Amino acid sequence: MAQIKTLLADLVDSRRVPGLALAVQRGDAPVEHYVLGNDTANVPLATDSLFIVASITKMATALAMLRLVDQGLLALDDLLRDDLPAAAAAQPGVTIRSLLCHTSGLPTDVAPEDAPYQVGLDWPKLAEAALLTPLEAAPWTRVQYSNVGYGLLAVIAQERAGLPFAELLRREVLDPLEIEGYLGIEPPRPVARLADVRGEHTADPELEPFNSSFYRSLALPWAGLVTTIDGALRIVRAFAGYPAGFLSASLRREATSDQTRGLGGGFKPPLMWNPCPWGLGPELRGVKEPHWTPASASPMSFGHSGASGCVAWHDPAHNLSWALIGTRTAENGWLLRRGSELAAAILA
């Protein structure tokens, strides 16, 4: 524990990250919290601070889909064209499974001209942009991390369940897991502000990614969830069987095993690997380098990182879960470099 505290304090004291929240849990033991520093507005962090957890949202979206599978409302190998025949990506081989494990052939994002990032953009318009997005590769030929795929999954889910995706997420994931979480609605208290947000809209406080209420209003099923450090931890632990019965055991095992047929790929350099194992939502550690988890982690460990500066991970070999959230985005590489060091200390 002393090494963990030293590493966290070094990150904050060196001003690499203004503040950090870490939650660690082994099995059913109580959660251990480590919280220090501030957000970029100098508001001190606490165990109940709210954060936008970026792509950890994808694991929550995947859990919603898997709950519908367990309920018999859909199947992993259902074809996209059976649900959304008008979608440009509704081609042979594109299935719910391929969307969950990023092997559909879709690009990373929708085309900017299909969903201009400006006042007036909302989730229905983003959903329409996802429907307009064509494949850029044949299905099952590569792993290409895709926000578009998770947009299409959300459209499928709300069609099957008959209610907006944000409501479905609350019903199937947030409430059953007792997670304080918000998708598309402004939380009742401030969200921790992040440093080092980059891009063309950072100069406009009304549009700034992650930090603006406009960004949070988009209800992005791939990056828009606001939750606490415990919420991020509970999302990854749901794939590990906590609480029991939330997912069927057989589906949970499938979700945390490689679904990519040994394909290579990933995000963008340097985060490209061959092979690039991925489950039904969670990424698998495998033998990937570089990575935000250390070589001492089990190859079957799994979880997800987020560009806002966060990671939630579970190692079944140690029955140990952790979630780490910083108040600086991952743009400068701190999560990749120092997240692995912290994870090594946690595993030790």
Image (cartoon, grey):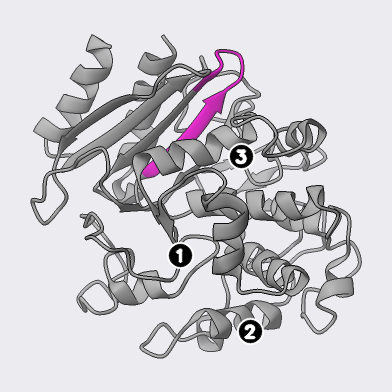
Q: Residues within 10 Å of mark 1 (few under 14, many from 20)?
A: many
The stretch of residues the image draws in magenta is: 310-320
- Residue depicted at 61% across the width and 14% down the height: 317
- Residue depicted at 61% across the width and 19% down the height: 316
Above or below — where is 330 with respect to 89?
above
- Residue flagged by tag 3: what amino acid is it? Glu
Separation of residues labelled 2 and 3 (CA atoms): 27 Å
Q: Which residue is mark 2?
A: 128
Separation of residues labelled 1 and 3 (CA atoms): 22 Å
Q: Which residue is mark 3?
A: 283
Which numbered dot is residue 331? none
x, y percentage for residue 318? 55, 13
Q: Is residue 287 left or right of residue 294?
A: right
Mark 2 or mark 1, earlier in chain: 2
Name the front one of labels 2 and 1.
1
- Residue flagged by tag 2: what amino acid is it? Glu
Q: Nearer the viewer, residue 110 or 348?
A: 348
Q: Secondary structure at mark 1?
A: loop
Q: Which residue is mark 1?
A: 183
